Image (cartoon, rainbow, N blue to C red):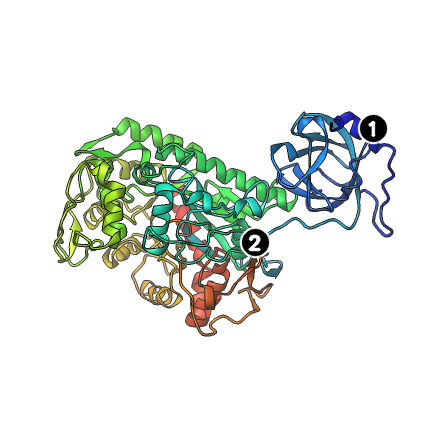
Amino acid sequence: MLPTLRAVLAIAALATALVEPGVAAADPAQTRYSLVDGCYEIATPAGPLRPEDGPYRMQATALGEYLLYGRQRTVLDAAGGSIHPVDVPSPTSVWRVDGSGAAGFTITDAATATSEPATFTPASGCADYPEAEVGASGTPGPGVDADGSIVGTIDAHVHVTAYEFLGGDFHCGRPWHPYGVTFALPDCAPYRTGTNGLIANFLDYGTPAHASDTRGWPDFHDWPGPSKLSTEGAYWTGIERAWLAGLRVMTIDLVDNESLCDLMIDRRNPCDDMTSVRTQAADLYALQDYIDARAGGPGRGFFRIVTDPAEARRVAASGKLAVVIGMELSDPMGCGVFLGQPKCDEAGVDRWLTELRAIGVSSFFPVHKFDDAFGGTKMDSGTTGLLSNIGNFIQTGTFWNVQPCSGPDHDKPQLPVPIAGDVNQFLGALTGPALGGAPLPFYPASAQCNARGLTDLGRYLINKMIDQGFLLEIDHMDEETADQALAIIEQRHYPGVLSSHGWDSTRTTERIMAAGGFVTPYAGSPTAFVANWRQAREMPRPSPFFGFGYGSDMNGLGPQGGPLGGNTVHYPFTSHDGQVTFDKERWGTRTFDIDTNGVATYGAYADWLEAIHTLGGPELMTDMFHGAESYVRLWERVRL
């Protein structure tokens, strides 16, 4: 029988904890947060805490909470009323530390909530807890130039919390986990069952029948990768690597899709877009706290959520990453449409705008993948478009009404159906019951446009977003809807309009720029991105100041830039400010090189930035490092 907690402490009182020669004494200035990552012998009034397993690495799980990671690579657990080592952490392996070095610490185990005074004596010989390697050294320079303007880049479109979407059991991996990287980046086999696995394989490999290598930490034989859309790419140390390279503003779009969620057999979250928004917003604040915990206390991390432009400027100017919360849903605010009838009204829009502001959302898309009560979607193309059109039918009761375009610009082209081969069989088996026997539509091969335009409720929403200073995302609106929304924006002289990942037409981009808005194309290929920068630079705009950025769409079911080939990026390289040196990022035994792996992780955006520097030269880099300033200036104009 295992001894009780009290008995263990009593036995431990008989042991002697020796600190190795040369190790400093406990620091009275130590806080409950600054213990993080330290190596300590831990003692209570009853004596040393299991000295046979120590000393212990303090691995933060949250602010002031730790795993006690022993010399034998086990963690202390207090389940069953006894303290004992375990190989795999669980909630009963978490220990809360309160107090300070000056006033005295207490340590509390999560299993029994038993608190004891504790001392933490610095030691050596601790094991290192597993973690992904950033692959960078140095400290970024100041976040402002001589005139006080922010110096830094912007990613205006990324999905860090997408591990919660589509029911929460589709996306394999997550950007962090309280127990660390081995839990955050696991083997993906549990996510590859039933329809979840079929859809994941379809998106990742183009066929539902694919025998992939699902192993995660530490091997990663088959993922992450630019085309692996169902697996995690934005682990937090990768975001840190991009920040070290100069990223100063990031818009994280909370994302979900109810109809695709309904197709998942395995799910832990409800298929409700707005419930998902609340969950993902809470996750984002938890990630901020986790990064703070790993950095030594509240506010000490590089990752700071902001809800207004003044806060964004303060954060970015301090050299940290200002995180703006956006929203990209297929049923925004519960305002879908079914058989032509909206599911919400003006009062509902008003209530949701109030809640979104309280949640911290500052920008969002009135329209995403499906037609809704506000307007029409621009439509996906290819087999993804066919799957999305089926989702549109499930959610709205109708397929897209595709007609010849009235002007030179068009929406995404649709495949003729039926499609031959296993893809057609897969789609039929997956969606047949939901379609209820309805035949798939046939669209001609000519230029195609979604005929649905901005609705009266859509006009109401656009005007309310302007009144309340929300940043308005035009991407994903079809040509008709975007044209009518921009007419309102132009009439009201509102600059708070964005195209964040290149879904709009050239004409729409020109109108956004002329309105004083901000445009960031899809990151993708460095060569294509540089061409987009040159085109955007020549477009008329009301201000001579020009900043540029990118929309990565990482974790958003959008492929990343592929391998560059050759020897475009030479490792090691230095950051734009010359203060940080970058080698290759490493996850476990897997090393990433953008020339051979492409943008496989979010950390590769440091390497991607170096690649576009090579292709575009110093003029491009000047514009890229004006990107954060340009975005914040726009936001200041609409929130004054």
Q: Distance between the Cα atoms at labels 2 and 1? A: 39 Å
The spot of residue 635 in percent (x, y) is 40, 46
Q: Name the disc covering residue 567, or none.
A: none
The local secondary structure at tag 1 comes to helix
Query: Is residue 491 in sight in this rendering?
Result: no
Residue in the image at 16% along x and 52% along y? 417
Mark 1 — residue?
10
Q: Amino acid at mark 2?
A: Pro
Quadrant in the rendering for residue 336? top left
x%, y% of residue 167?
Answer: 39, 37
Task: Tell whether 85 sits left or right of 479.
Answer: right
| Quarter of the image where the C terminus is located | top left
**From the viewer's perspective, is residue 610 above or below residue 213?**
below
N-terminal of the pair, mark 2 or mark 1, is 1
Farthest residue in the bottom direction?
Answer: 566
> Is residue 475 rendered to the left or right of residue 151?
left
237 up-or-down from 334: above or below? below
Position of the N terminus, as image quadrant, is top right
Write the residue at 84% across / 44% down: 25
- The secondary element bearing badge 2 is classed as loop
Could you say where residue 55 lies in the image, as x and y percent from the top left?
77, 44
Q: Residues within 10 Å of mark 2 (few under 14, many from 20)?
A: some
For disc 2, the marked residue is 218
> What residue is drawn where x is 56% and y is 54%?
218
Q: Amino acid at mark 1?
A: Ala
Q: Name the foreground residue: 379 vs 548.
A: 379
Q: Is residue 596 visible?
A: yes
